[in-house]
Image (spheres, rainbow, N blue to C red):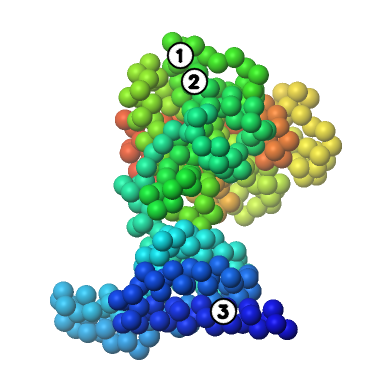
Amino acid sequence: MFERFTKAKSLESAQKIALSLLSEKGEANAQSIAAKFVEQFQLLDKPDQLKFFEFLAHKFSPDPIDVLQAAQLYADKYDDESLVALFKIVEPARQELLRRINRAPNGTQTIVRMREQLLTHTKNKSGLKAVDADMQHLLNSWFNPGFLELHEITWSSPALLLEKIIQHESVHAIDGWDDLRRRLQPDRRCYAFFHPQLPGEPLIFVEVALVTTISKEVGPLLDKKSESLDAKKFKTAIFYSISNCQPGLRGISLGNFLIKRVAEKILQEIPSVKTFCTLSPVPGFNKWLDALPGSPALEALEDKKGKIAQSLKVLMKDGEWSKRLSKGWTPALAKAEEKTALMYLCFIYLTQFVHKSSGDSVAKFHLANGAKLHDINWAADLSKKGFAQSSAMMVNYLYELNAVEDNHEKFVKKEVVFSRGLSSL
């Protein structure tokens, strides 16, 4: 009973501090009051956090009547004064609340953590989208790439930072310190973005392999027993993993700027490197493949419908493709017609479906970032995860720095730029 009472008092206290922070007293003493709020919010358990977010949604939203009146005034007068007045009315008071929370010593980190918790609730709870939009709006400004610092992670970096790299690697798991050490050798690089208000906390990092030519399989890049390549042979930079470290920054554009900044840095430091390319997973392919037979989306591809149906017929002999994988199918056992069918369908998935909701998230990221679909690689990731996601296939996205803007514009217009070598598919 005492514990319930304490939790209730914590929630009530957090709400009172939030109201105080928005008052005139709060404006004058924002830093000290914000520090109290940070301390109090950290005491809230998950249910009470949800109640606090609902409090933000209901208590700090604009009054619809005031919004309507301000909008009508602007429509009638159409001048700067009425527009500024409309801005002030429309902006939720919780945005100012968040700005004042940000004045606390750990304010920025608290807001990032608050959004991380909020995102766990928005999946199942309605009425919180506006609160999330406010947080994302402010975080977009505060984590503008112009404010971020790019640092290389090396074996000499603090142990705590290296532990966070191991912890947050989300594409190719790091198997202990020996594995990490190999990934930080002279022919391997790791770069991360940091924010001045979150010292020692990587926001996002990318791992790069410096090799002679474009890599077609990930195994050699991850082999922790491999010998380091001579620097004289560095010709190509392969971006083989990019990982977000802060769930609260989901939807904040960091990765696209990170890749371009890293490419520019490598270009300056290692002039022999002329090619910048990824070796990327296709995480949505198998799931899409299982859902493809009978999908309404096929109707829009009338000219390719026949070949798609034939390819599916080759693959779906025993029901869903995932069931064949679970029964021991491997690229080494694949018949020529199966390889042809899988490569073709992967090409269709990446070029014809990437703009749809079922489109591959990694493909969307790189293609929207101005990369070109360069190649689809057979038996490129033989890990358990690689089989489960994409039947062991991986993709090269090529970053031609002088063509990035044109490729981005074409992608926005629903066009996917791909290399001539893929035309046969």
Q: Secondary structure at mark 3?
A: helix
Mark found first going from the N terminus, 3 or 2: 3
From what the image shows, is residue 88 above or below residue 381?
A: below
The residue at which mark 3 appears reads as 11
Residue 76 circle label: none
| Position of residue 123 in the picture relative to residue 209 (left or right) | right
| Distance between mark 3 and mark 2 Cα atoms | 51 Å
Q: Nearer the viewer, residue 81 or 155?
A: 155
Residue designated by label 1: 231
Rendered location of residue 378, percent (x, y):
64, 26
Dot 3 or dot 1: first in sequence order is 3
Q: Are marks 1 and 2 in contact (CB under 8 Å)?
A: yes
Task: Name the amino acid type tagged 3.
Answer: Leu
Above-or-below relation of 18 to 241 = below
Please indicate whether residue 322 sits to the left or right of residue 46 in the image.
Answer: right
| Residue 6 in sight in this render | yes
Residue holding disc 2: 186
User: How far is the residue under mark 1 from the one under mark 2?
Assistant: 8 Å
Mark with earlier residue (1, 2): 2
Quadrant of the rendered image containing residue 320: top right
**What residue sits 43% from the left and 42% below the top?**
193
